[in-house]
Image (spheres, grey):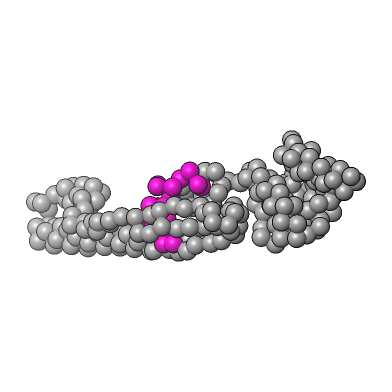
Amino acid sequence: MAFTKKTVTKVEKSKEVENLIETIPAEENGNDVELLKKQLISTQNQLDELRALIVNNSQKHESTTNADSMDRWCTIVHLEDRAEGLYTIFRSSLMEYRFCFFGETRKVRRAELDDIISKNRKWFERLVVTLGADDSDLIEEYGLPKADKVILHQNQLTRLPALSLEDLKKLYEKVCDTHKQLMIRKWVTGYYENKDGNYRNLNKVNLLNDLSNGAMSHILDDMTEQKRIKRS
């Protein structure tokens, strides 16, 4: 973004001073009157120069502030957890960015962030990525959606299978819709990887299935089939 330095070369004279000069009768007191007029004109010129200096300094400050703002570092946070080999990909005019894991971050300059959002706004609107906590002012400035509820943190996702039924229910109900889906996907992945027995806790699977309107039904079917195989 280009900034143009504006220079004020002329400021209109104060109307009050002009009126005062005009009211002084030239025929009275001769030289004294002319001297007074010269003093008023000199004062006016000094005021004009002061006003021009103030305006120019204000414009320089605004230009510098805007330039500093565009040089500011901003953080982009990935809010999805992709399967191995899959990525969230978006591009700016400078480079390509790839995210795979939940909580991944990238640092970019504000000038590049403008370009990224203009080209990849859908990822921000779907809350696949968002801006960092220090950049919350930019979320409003860009008109990006805010999470209607809480956003998951990495440690919460890691501890997910170990939560009690009550805590699991509370967490699911308070997170945003994007992370409700993330919790379900995380649980399904954990179930099939079978590295943590908590993912196969029938009560927890039933709870998540009820909360998600049947999103875990295929897991329940698989658990039922596994039980039948063991009995036979």
Which quadrant of the view contains residue 153? bottom right
In the rendered image, is residue 92 in sight?
yes
Considering only vertical position in the picture, is 11 above or below 43? above
Please tell me whether residue 117 belongs to the stretch shown in magenta. Answer: yes
Residue at x 76%, y 38% (from the top left corner): 217
Q: Quadrant of the C terminus?
A: top right
In front here: 86 or 52?
A: 86
Q: Quadrant of the N terminus?
A: bottom left
Residue at x 90%, y 46% (from the top left corner): 231
Which is the main secondary structure of the residues drawn in magenta?
Answer: helix
Q: Indicate left or right for 179 with 198 as reference.
A: left
Residue that protrudes farthest toward the right in the picture: 231
In front here: 21 or 45?
A: 45
Residue 97 in the image, given as x and y percentages of width and height? 45, 58
Please tell me whether residue 26 belongs to the stretch shown in magenta. Answer: no
Q: Indicate left or right for 18 with 127 as reference.
A: left
Considering only vertical position in the picture, is 196 above or below 201? below
Q: Indicate left or right for 5 with 178 as reference.
A: left
Q: Indicate left or right for 164 with 189 as reference.
A: right
Residue 79 in the image, given as x and y percentages of width and height? 59, 53
Residue 104 in the image, given as x and y percentages of width and height? 56, 61
Residue at x 71%, y 49% (from the top left corner): 188
Magenta-highlighted residues: 108-124
Number of dots carrying numbers: 0
Residue that protrudes farthest toward the top in the picture: 213
In the rendered image, is residue 40 in sight?
no
Residue at x 78%, y 53% (from the top left corner): 199
